[in-house]
Each structure stands twice: as structure tokens, then as C-alpha cells.
Amino acid sequence: MLKYIAYILTIGALLSCSAVAKNQEVTVKNRKIMVNGERYIIRGICYSPVKKGTSNRSFENLTEDLALMVEAGINTIRVYSAIDDKAVLDEIDAAGIKVIMGIVYNQNEDCDIVSGSFIDYINKYKDHPAILMWELGNEYNYHPEWFEGGITTWYTALNNAAELIHENDDSHPVSTAHGEVPKAFALSSCPNVDVWGLNTYRWDHPEAIFEEWAGVSSKPMYLSESGGDSYMTTTNEGYEKGENQQAQADANGKILKAVFLNQKICSGITLFSFTDGWWKAGNPHTQEPGGHAPFDGGVPYDGSANEEYWGIVDLDRNPKATFPVVKAIYNEIADQM
């Protein structure tokens, strides 16, 4: 409890001067993401906090969450839709954490790409020091049915949106989160994308993806989603069926080590995810196995994405067995920078 009180006092002091904080310049150089001329390695987490019994994102637990993230050595959070709340961004920045800000394709003209309203959001927050980069879409290549005319419609919209961002903001790169390594058509269709995030689940050994990426692009990449869940649908590889936090801890440890051994190609990872998500499989009042994710056969160690069991902390913010594993690896990498 004392550490949270101290953290709150620190946040308060930092927030008092956040209004005059100087925006940082984020650029790309060869395969690297640079912040004020220094290489930036993402020690990240996917963050979509949804309270028990609901299905809507809420930042009510932000202060507690940021304290846990700082403890774990996290320097970046990835969100799936835009945060239109300066106080939230100020607190994230005060914690020393940056945001990969997700922008969606269609959100009923509310900060979305299809309506063009996203650019107003970009211009509103482009000078905020919490922003690392803008990220357009999340593995939309798995859902061509969402776009009239198919996936070509999405790649055209993505490239045009990235170009418009460049015209309005020269201080942040534009990324997209793609399901697995993009094909040549996707890469050639989107020259305005600066950084490619790859959502990839390849058991506990993602090493091959870095070589694959090096063969198709010279741009920076990072793993925008990867990791393991803490529920085994079946007994496999020595891990018992049912809730199994050790399986998740072992998988995440191997994945993170592989990422940071390949920094010549990979700019880091936003591990999936910070909290468990009780809303994903059905009843948001209970935690249950199930849920669906596309192409989830590579999820360790049962080939099944039990969508409500992915957090490094549970919904009550109790650290799971994977938390100290993530903490040790992230803090070791931070000490090396």
C-alpha cells in the first residue's frame, strides 16, 4: 500500500508540470525506432482495461495499473482505440510510459479512418509527450469482409491515412498491427507505413519471424501481440488441463528472451496482455475458458486462445506467475539501455 501512496504523490508532482513538458521527436532510422536520436526498444504490454461485469474500457484503475507496469519495467502500452482524455495521457506520461495509440477504421465517425475524423484527434494530441506512434488498425487482414471491396480497400485506406498523418505530424511514425508477416502486396500497397507491428503466435519460439521480416522489408518491426494464456484446454507438454499459470509464465519467458536476442531486426514487443478479460467469452461477471481468436493454433501450449486468461495480472490486479518473469526480463533489458 505504501508504494502506491508514494507513487500517487510522485504522479501528482509530475502532473503539475506536465502542461509544459516538451514534446519528444520520434523518428525511424533504418530498422530502428528513435526517440530524440536514441534507439527506443519497446518493453510493452497491450492494455485494454475492462472492469468486471462490463464490456467497456475504463481507466478507473489507471494509477494502480501504472504502478504495476513501472514495477514490471514496462515502458510502452499499446491500446486498440484512441484515448481522448488528456488527464489519462498526462498520468501515463508522468509514469515514464509511452503509448502506441490505436486508431480504428470504423467507429461511427468517432476518431475513425473511414470518416476522416481521426485526423482531428491526431492534431489535438500530436504534441503530447506520451505518444510514441500512431497505429492504424489491428490485424484487419484477417477480416476482408469488413471492407467493401475486400482487403484492397483496407490497404488503400491505411496508406492514405498514413500519408495524411505525415502531412499533419512530422514528429511521430505511423504503424499498423498486421496479423503475421504481410505479403508482398500489403507491403507494396502501404509505402507510407513507417513501422510494422506483427500479431504473431508461434508457440514459444518466434525466432523465425525475424528472419522472415528481414527478407521482405528494411523497415522497423515489433511484435504487437504475442505471448501465452494461463488456461490449458487439454493436458499437453507436461502442463495440466485447467488454469495453469506456470504454462503462461514459461511461454512468456521464452518468447521475451527470443525477442530481445533479435534486436537487430526487432524493436521489441507489446505482450498480450496486462489484465485478464472476463468479457470476451460470454458472461462478463465470471471468468470462463473459451473465446475465439483468428489463427490461434500457435498459442502455447494447447493451441487454443482462451481469451479471458491472458493477463500478467488478474482482474483484481493480483500478479500472476508470469509477472515476475516479465519483470525480470524487462528490467534487465532496461538496465542494458
Image: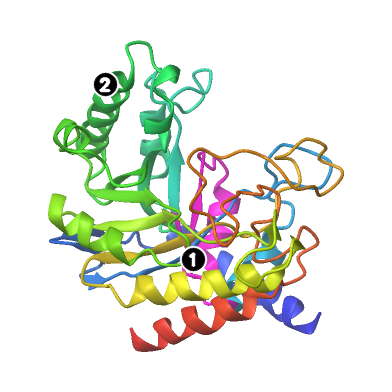
How far, Cα to Cα, is label 1 from label 2?
A: 35 Å
Nearest to N terminus: mark 1 or mark 2: 1
Q: Nearer the viewer, residue 73 or 178?
A: 178
Determine if the magenta segment contains residue 4: no
Amino acid type, mark 2: Thr
- Residue under label 2: 152
Determine if the magenta segment contains residue 80: yes
Amino acid type, mark 1: Ile
**184 horizontally vs 81: left or right:** left
* Residue 282 position by quadrant: top right
Task: State the image coordinates of residue 191 (x, y, percent, origin top left).
Answer: 15, 38
Q: What residue is drawn where x is 60% and y is 49%?
A: 304
Task: State the image coordinates of residue 91 (x, y, percent, origin top left).
Answer: 58, 61
Q: What residue is drawn where x is 51% and y is 42%?
A: 80
**198 horizontally vs 49: left or right:** left
Dot 2 falls on a residue whose secondary structure is: helix
